[in-house]
Amino acid sequence: MADNKSISYNSIMDDLRAGRYLPVYYLHGEESYYIDKICDYIAEHALRPEERDFNQTIMFGSDVTASQVADAARRYPMMAERQVVIVKEAQNIKQTDALEKYMKQPMKSTVLVMCHKNGKIDGRKREYVKAIQQAGILFESQKLRDRDLPHFIENYLQARQVPIDPKSTQLIAEAIGADLSRLTSELDKVLISLPANDRRVTPQVVEDQIGVSKDFNGFELRDAIVNRNIFKANQIINYFDKNPKAGSIYSFLPLLFNYFQNLMIAYYAPQRQSQEGVAQWLGLKSPWGAKDYMTGMRNYSGVKVLQIIGKIREIDAKSKGLDNPNTPPGELMKELIFYILH
């Protein structure tokens, strides 16, 4: 069976594309995107179209018991090499004894796919977990961290031979967030809109197709703050104040907190005079990403950065109503930006 400690989405997909199927795939976790991708691939490729009527079964955890799933998995395929049993909403199956028993002696001619979304398998069911791992694959689909979104976007478009610049990547990441199903849907919409003679994603394309202003957005605000461009920062804040849907304190506070937190860490880099050294210290995927931190260390002292982090925490609390009876979000935004830049 597979070494579950080294399993990744890409390694699973590589095996599936090579036609290597295992008897059990238990897919669980908070990120539904990877669960759906693996399940859909098996449903579309494990059997030929003419084999599916008799050899592909789709069940829902809320409608079946563990015994019924196990019985279905024990059936032999009809005029095919294998059968596929897909269980959606597998988290709704509470009593798993019958499935645990099946996992210990799974049918080699069955591909059983268990889709457990919005959570993880109960870690207290150690024997059940062990049986799954021995039978096939136990894969946890984890939410991407915000800092990993640009890399995901770049790889998604690169696989489709479409280049994207760093600013456009950041704009999309900030506008859509870590919901990968929605993110890939928006990227597909962008791809469809690109003309045949210019297959590039630019800030103008992002503005036209996703609705994010290329001039007034969190990325530009962060850039203005990094470079201590007071005029530009106030322009953007005033724009946000008049257009709350374009940006608000709730969207840019995490962005600024993440930047200044990393800037504080950058001060402790053994080679903080080197862009490559800072990138390695911060765990950035490319030296280019360290440029803003090099600029930040020139424009803000370590003491000021520590004070800014404290101010961001204070404004965050006020934005949630703590010690703040009536100051509106727009005024809190202006208060924070003034504090950072002066």
Image (cartoon, rainbow, N blue to C red):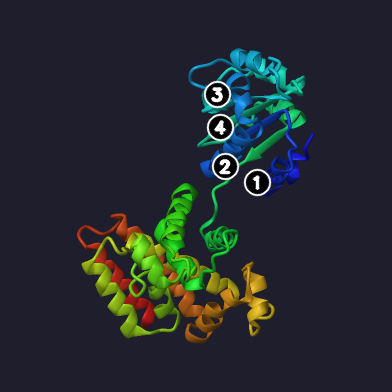
3D distance between C-alphas at marks 2 and 1: 9 Å
- From the image, tell me which residue sits under label 2: 37
Amino acid tagged 2: Lys
Q: Nearer the viewer, residue 163 or 70?
A: 163
Q: Gap in Å between the C-alphas at discs 3 and 4?
A: 14 Å
Q: Are marks 1 and 3 in contact (CB under 8 Å)?
A: no
Q: Give the amino acid type for the residue marked by disc 3 in the picture.
A: Ile
The residue closer to the viewer here, 212 or 116, is 212
Of callouts 3 and 2, the N-terminal one: 2
Q: Earlier in the sequence, mark 4 or mark 1?
A: 1
Which one is in front, 192 or 334? Answer: 192
Residue at the spot 46% in from the left edge and 61% down from the top edge: 173
Q: Residues within 10 Å of mark 1 (few under 14, many from 20)?
A: some
Where 64 sits versus 222, above or below?
above
Task: State which quarter of the image contains the C terminus.
Answer: bottom left
Residue 123 on image: x %, y %: 64, 32
- Position of residue 2 relative to residue 201, above or below, is above
User: Alpha carbon of mark 4 to alpha carbon of mark 2: how far?
Assistant: 13 Å
- Mark sitting on residue 9: 1
Nearer to us: label 2 or label 1: 2
Measured in 3D between alpha carbons, the distance from the residue under mark 3 to the one under mark 2, in whole angstroms, is 16 Å
First-in-chain label (4 vs 2): 2
Q: Secondary structure at mark 4?
A: strand
Badge 1 or badge 3: first in the primary sequence? 1
Residue 85 appears anywhere in the view: no
Local secondary structure at mark 1: helix
Cβ atoms under marks 2 and 1 closer than 8 Å:
yes
Q: Secondary structure at mark 3?
A: strand
